Amino acid sequence: MQMTTPDHNTPHKHATPQADAHDRHPWQIFRVFLKLGLSAFGGPVAHLGYFRNEFVQRRQWLSEHSYADLVALCQFLPGPASSQVGMALGLSRGGYLGAFAAWVGFTLPSAFLLMVFAYGMGSFGQWVPAGVLHGLKIVAVAVVAQAVWGMAKRLCAGVLRTAIMLLVAGAVLLWSSAWVQLLALVVCGAAGMLLFKPDASAAQGSSLPVQISRRAGMVWLALFLVLLLGLPVLMQVLPNSRVAQVEAFYRAGALVFGGGHVVLPLLQASVVPPGWLSNDVFMAGYGAAQAVPGPLFTFAAFLGAAMPPDALPRWANGFLLLLAIMAPSFLLIAGAMPFWEALRSNARMRAALVGINAGVVGILLAALYHPVWTSAIYRPTDFLLAALAFVVLMFARLPSWLVVLATGLGGWLLAMW
């Protein structure tokens, strides 16, 4: 699989064929995503900022335009956008094994921590000081701000694109529904086709290669629908709690728009009324899920491990339900990407993506204020710590994980002060 030459927005990365092959090996992909899985605090929006830092700026796996297009695709699909972006990046670098390696690396740390917490069920606040947790929220402000700044410079040049960005940000802040975000991107696409000249050169320069044929994509999409429609039927044929749990978690992963924060109340409605878990245990796990790195969908691992053991050990049930909630994400991304690449090479689609990309930046800008800013910045000292982390990320070029650790320590020191 050959990467196309990056466009003018991304510097060319000189690498020998041996180095490039090493960079595409599933083990190397796993290592890169494992580092992110251990350090990417702050929720799905912050994760997109971490991914941009790592894969657009540092490793130059893809261009800014290609990354924004990929984020736009994952915003259209149900499921966790950050996990889907990670799977797509792994898929483009190393095929199916690369996608699996990316998912495991990014997901395993938080899933492991949450299952350990499910086994212990102690007070999470005794494990990590509250000041450290607050510092991790503060660093998310800096990470998202850096992503918004960098993407806006490249994707929102000119009055029209800036206006689209601000209008989308205002709409998302006024109406917080995930459906509003989806509708906003549709409107942005239509506006792009009407207002902007198709940019054929951008399509040639920012392609994201995928080793999946359209026929294979159709198979993955068909499997997605078969499971979505067939699991409820199987639940009627085999009425037991295991099948019911898999069906509930698969349905949650297949139908929810807006990511982890949206799926949590849906899961609560699925697991508490049947008596699989008490609401107190659910809320304890909810708090723990906010404090660990990686995708919030790994909350499913906590729920599975916290349920009373039966035929399966708790850890096995945790992994089973984690796979159930994440399976739709892979099936959708593997099914959609072959067609997405064909669509994005179309001149009219390129014009639409100009508007969509400006809308994506608007969604990130809205998220920077709420929930990222509003959940982290309470005092002037919080603002100063976030500003310091932002300056370090922008100009010192330190690794994100180091800034995360330093800001967590800074939050702890401020809490003691």
Image: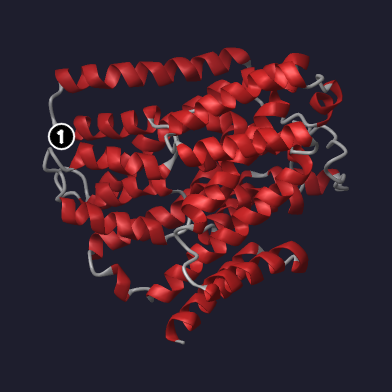
Q: Residue furthest bottom?
A: 417
Identify the residue shown where x is 26% and y is 32%.
248
Q: Left or right: 25 with respect to 270?
A: right
What secondary structure is found at the residue carrying circle 1? helix
Q: Amino acid at mark 1?
A: Ser
Badge 1 crowding class, 10 Å Cα cut-off, few under 14, some 14 to 19, many 20 or more, is few
Asked which colour scheme the image uses, the reply is secondary structure
Q: How many discs appear?
A: 1
Q: Nearer the viewer, residue 414 or 343?
A: 414
Identify the residue shown where x is 41% and y is 37%.
326
Q: Left or right: 66 with respect to 337?
A: right
- Image height check: is 67 above or below 204? below
Q: Confirm whether residue 333 shows in the render.
A: no
Residue 362 lies, in percent from the top left, at: 61, 39
Q: Left or right: 240 with respect to 64?
A: left
- Image height check: is 342 above or below 45? above
- Image height check: is 31 above or below 337? below
Q: Nearer the viewer, residue 194 or 217?
A: 194
Q: Confirm whether residue 81 shows in the render.
A: yes
Residue 5 lies, in percent from the top left, at: 85, 34
Identify the residue shown where x is 68% and y is 36%.
68
Q: Quadrant of residue 25?
A: top right
Identify the residue shown where x is 83% and y is 37%.
6
Which residue in the structure is indicated by mark 1?
A: 241
Residue 1 lies, in percent from the top left, at: 74, 31
Residue 328 lies, in percent from the top left, at: 42, 29
